[in-house]
Structure formats: C-alpha cells, structure tokens
Image: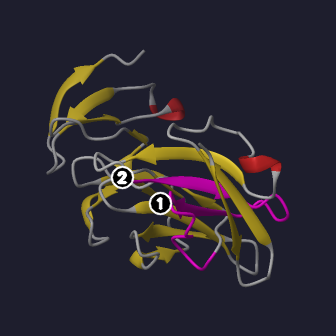
Amino acid sequence: TAVVRSLDDTTGTTYYIERKNEFLARGAVLSGKTVQLKGAYERTDGKGYYVVKRPSDRLENLMDWEGNFVSKEWFLSAMLFSEGLASVTRRLPNFDEERGYIDSSGNPSIPLRPDIENQSDFRGGLAANKKGGKWGYIDKTGRWAIEPRFAEAGSFSEGLAPVQLKGGNEGGERWVLIDKSGQEFGAISRC
C-alpha cells in the first residue's frame, strides 16, 4: 500500500510523497504533486533517501523515507549519500557556486567552498575534487589527500583509481592507476 504524507517547508509550500515497498522510478513525480524524485538509495537496514527537486525554483534536497528533509537548506544540486556524506552545490548571490558535503543530519561535514569547481562521491574514503582546472582527492576531513594534478579522475575501487595525466593540448590522453598516496602504477587503456 502507498503512504502519502503532507510536508511543509519554511516557505509554507506543501510537498507530497507517495511511497510503496519498492523504489520509485528516476524522474517520477511523487503523487503528481510538487516534489519531483531525482534518485533513490536503499541502505542495507531497509532505510534510504530520495533526492527531490522543487519544480518552482529547481532546487534540490534529500528526503528520508519517512518524508523528512535532511537539510533546511535547498541546494542547486544534491547527490545521494556515499560513505555517510552527500555532495551538495549551493548558488551564491553573485551566481558563483560553492561545493561541499553534508552529513545525514544536514550539517556541513566538509564546508562548502567557492574554489572547488566539481566533485564526486566518496569511494574508498576519498572523493575526487576539481580545483584550478585539475583533479585531486580529498579525505573526509576536507584535506587534500592527493593534491590536484590530474586532467581527469575516477573513483577509488579496491585501493586504486584511474586518472588521466595529460589531456588534449598536452600530448593526448595517458591513463594510469594510482593508489591512495598518489603513487602511479602502469598505464591503462580506457574505453
């Protein structure tokens, strides 16, 4: 059976969520009302989160399966939790953006910063972040574990991540695997 709840945010807008005992499809509109589902994640304990979008201003937030918003703030973009942290992007009044990570209570775990140009989810305790046109990796304290120096950076898996050392105008692509200290291993081909 479906569960329908009415929620109010600080502006007084009413949101509705309809949930069954299965995931709702990406892009589905919950109950045909004002919150649009962007994605869903189920934890092993049976609880999970939705990424929802407000059609009125296209801002995003995370909502738990009980219908509670994770943060009081709405973001330009929000990603699902990965290793306990969710990547968020906020638009500043001058239309610049700042990026960081929040925890499941909606608190900034890694403060939002305007010098981060792009970021990924945490995998293996590290997340790729782009600063000054180059990618590096931060740890869960927000410190650089591997300073930005790569043209592209993939996620860690089993202690290794694919990175591109040179790009386009610098002599073509050269991909290698790195470990969590940034040490390079043999070249790889990337399809």
Image quadrant holding the N terminus, namely top right
Please determine whether, in this image, residue 29 is positioned above or below residue 187.
Answer: below
Q: Which residue appears farthest toward the front when viewing the image?
A: 1
Going from N to C along the chain, the mark reached first, 2 or 1, is: 2
Q: Position of residue 102 (x, y in %)?
A: 43, 70
Which region shows up in magenta? 47-73
The kind of secondary structure element at disc 2 is: loop
Magenta span contains residue 56: yes
Between 90 and 14, which is closer to the camera in this rendering?
A: 14
Q: Is residue 180 left or right of residue 11?
A: left
Mark 1: which amino acid?
Ser
Residue density around tag 1, few if under 14, some if 14–19, many if 20 or more, within 10 Å: many
Q: Residues within 10 Å of mark 2 (few under 14, many from 20)?
A: some
The alpha-carbon separation of the residues under discs 2 and 1 comes to 9 Å
**Label for residue 123?**
none
Residue 87, disc:
1
Residue 134 in the image: state x and y as whole percent: 44, 52
Q: What residue would you read off at disc 2?
A: 82
In contact (CB < 8 Å): disc 2 and disc 1: yes
Of tags 2 and 1, which is closer to the observer? 2
Identify which residue, 46 or 171, lies in the foreground.
Answer: 46
**Magenta segment includes 52:** yes
Q: Is residue 89 above or below residue 47?
A: below
Left or right of 64, for residue 164: left
